[in-house]
Amino acid sequence: MRCLVERDFERAGGLADLAVAVATEHGVGIWATAGQLSQGAALVISDPGRAAALIGAAIVKLDAIPWPLYHPTFLCFQAEALSRLGRVAETREKVDRALAMIASTGLVWWDAELHRIRAALIRAEGGGDAAVREALGPRRGDSR
Amino acid sequence: MIFANLYNYTGKFAASAQSVAEAARHYQADSHHGSFELSGLDLGIHLPMARMTALSLSGDHSGADRDMNEILRLAEEQPQVGVLCWAF
């Protein structure tokens, strides 16, 4: 995960490949799914189509267990991949889902990156600087 | 360690680092090596993992790199497949 935080995608991809190989060999499904999520995230720039597909398939599996910790993170990577493919409506869907999960869980550790993607999305939807500031600026009563 | 994780995922990285430091003061590898069987967590690896996350998200990449190397070394020395996959 640390390599994804720092966007060291080459190293992240190598570690994710190892995780998937070991988890698959030993039949540890949850870690194979987690590895697949990281494999997808590592491809977000080099192969966004495959990134979106890998993450999408893994998130479906992750939805089956009550463990929301990584959903916002990988929805954010999926949104970035979809954004790079020009699939604006799907990008909006993933960003909104991630925001809703963060609002309901308080898991804000991926907020900064999500807001970066959100700003790019607002521009792709035709919004300008004012729209970005309005969406991402401090809210009244927000003390963070 | 529970607080360290909670603080990381709720964006309180300095508080997380403090919790890791406090946990490390109580951790003794010889007496806690069975923590995986008790909790599903290998505390010996979880300490540098939580610290690495806090350091990385705080921008201390060299510190995070040091912890990451320690995590991978410890993970490959222990027998649990799930812990190894988690560390990757």
Image (cartoon, grey):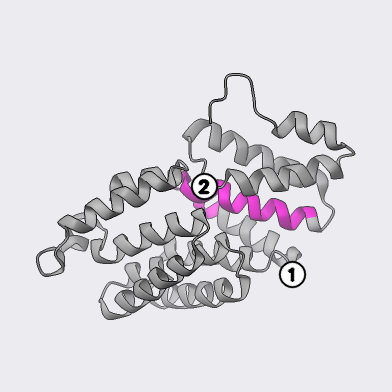
Task: Residue A99 in the image: state x and y as whole percent.
Answer: 61, 37
Residue type beneath disc 1: Asp
Between discs 2 and 1, the one toward the N terminus:
1
Q: In the image, residue A93 lies at what x, y percent?
A: 71, 41
| Residue that badge 2 annotates | A63
The residue at the point 74 percent across, 71 percent down is A46
| Chain letter of the residue beneath label 2 in the structure image | A
Q: Is residue A33 left or right of A125 when viewed as pictured? A: left
> What is the residue that sits farthest to the right in this orientation?
A126
Question: In the image shown, does B52 or B87 lie closer to the viewer?
Answer: B52
Q: Amino acid at mark 2?
A: Asp
**Label 1 neighbourhood size at 10 Å, few (<14), some (14-19), many (20+)?**
some
Tell me where residue B74 sits by quadrant: bottom left
Look at mark 1 in the image and give the residue it sits on: A47
Magenta-highlighted residues: A60-83
Quarter of the image where one finds residue B50 = bottom left
Q: Say left or right for A126 vs B67.
A: right
